[in-house]
Amino acid sequence: MRLLIKNIKTLAGIVPLEVLRLEGSQMNSAQQIDDAFLVAEDGIITRFGKMEELGSVEADEVVDAEGRVVFPAFCDSHSHIVYAGSREGEFRDKIAGMTYEEVAARGGGILNSADRLAEASEEELFEAAKRRAWRMIRSGAATLEVKSGYGLTTESELKMLRVIRRLQEELPATIKATFLGAHAVGRAYKGRQSDYVECVCQEMIPAVAEQGVAEFVDVFCDRGFFTPEETAGILECGKRYGLRPKIHANELASSGGVQVGIKYGALSVDHLEEANEQDVLDLKNSSTIPTVLPGASFFSNLPFAPARRMIDEGLAVAIASDCNPGSSPSGNMMLLWSLACIKMRLTPEEALSALTINGAAALGLSADRGAISVGRRADLVVSKPVPSLAYLPYSFGEELVEQTIIGGVKVDMR
Ligand code: NIG
Ligand code: FE
């Protein structure tokens, strides 16, 4: 199967195959070609360049991208799209002045979603998650990470992970599963946090590993949730069972999450709204990717993570959606592109690198995706006709993805 995309106004996000992440100033300088073409064979990019170099090429599928920008599909490295119901009641409470922590402290928040998930059938959960995943694919994502964490019992965590496995089987996107049993202390363990942590380590992790339903282990390491010491125990246990750490850290306070993540070789530490100067400097001495979630800052009225500072310090920043019912109920990476530019002062090119190759790196997948290179997957977005690349984040909220292409195949956009 050969795909040819011709007359591309701007082909963006070109990175050499051997480059696995873009750090600091490199994030602004991924190459672009105007008036370009791209050829993919059996899902892999085999050629690209200036239209004048194309020559005659036979193809099974030809896309005329006149006036359009083509860029690597988004790699959303952090989401919670398996959930039941919605939480607009808490949305009202927050408008009235309650904080995320106050909502959680009175038994709402994550526990609210856990109650609903316990009642939902696996089929209902799957159908709802599938609809969300399709929305994300149609807004330009080809790779998604999906977490458990609304189960909070062994049985319900496994139920969530089975739903994620079905998403992996039935959707065209690549989907990676993360076990997040330590998202909050389950209701049955109220007041017995250390017993819950023991259950996560002794019961949940062995069961998850035995059933082979997750690749990564996550912990909500933050004020009022899990301490760095508890996180260390869970990550250590996860590593013994072959689960690589990717953790939630410093959303509510700079509470040692970054350092524990680095110590246990986390692929990424995510959120970082409250990251301080020391956290940034510690990240510089590690290969852990700082992943920022501008949708959570926007929706939850939290500070935006210091992504500008991180890039100026030479870090490889990733951006993900955090799509979840409590703190960020949108998986639209185009909107995050705008927020990263407007609220974090990233250039359109820096933000695109964060949403693509660095997101892939935060999942350990950047060797074969996240950028335009001969040899990488043809996971691509074709925009609607636009004046330039910068118009894409500038015209925030406009639906500008015309076509998502996954593995060289146009997905159904209806
Ligand atoms: O990443 N911060 C922790 N977990 C999610 C929110 C979960 C929820 O409120 O349902 C997040 O923001
Ligand atoms: Fe999250």
Image (tube, grey):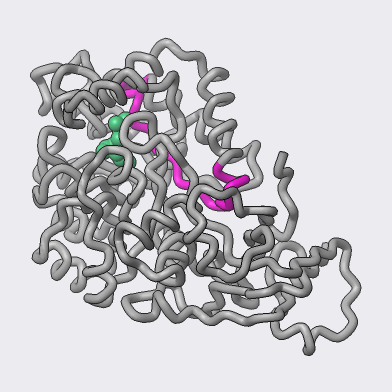
Q: Quadrant of the N terminus?
A: bottom right
Residue 142 among magenta residues? yes
- Horizontal side of 319 relative to 238 (left or right) equals right
Horizontal and vertical percent position of residue 126: 55, 25
Q: Quadrant of residue 190?
A: top left
Magenta stretch in the rendered image: 136-155
Instruction: Say which of 122 and 199 sits in front.
Output: 122
Instruction: Say which of 338 and 220 sits in front.
Output: 338
The picture quadrant for ligand 2 comes to top left
Rendered residue at 12%/26% (across/down)? 193
Residue 338 among magenta residues? no
Figure label count: 0
Instruction: Say which of 242 and 320 sits in front.
Output: 320
Rendered view: 20 above or below 267:
below
Instruction: Say which of 26 and 168 sits in front.
Output: 26
Rendered view: 361 above or below 297:
below
- Which residue is outermost to the top? 119
- Horizontal side of 128 relative to 161 (left or right) equals right
Rendered view: 382 above or below 350:
above
Horizontal and vertical percent position of residue 221: 18, 42
Horizontal and vertical percent position of residue 40: 74, 69
Rendered residue at 70%/83% (across/down)? 49
Q: Quadrant of the C terminus?
A: top right
Horizontal and vertical percent position of residue 238: 28, 44
Rendered view: 163 above or below 51:
above
Rendered residue at 46%/14% (across/down)? 120
Rendered residue at 54%/73% (across/down)? 13
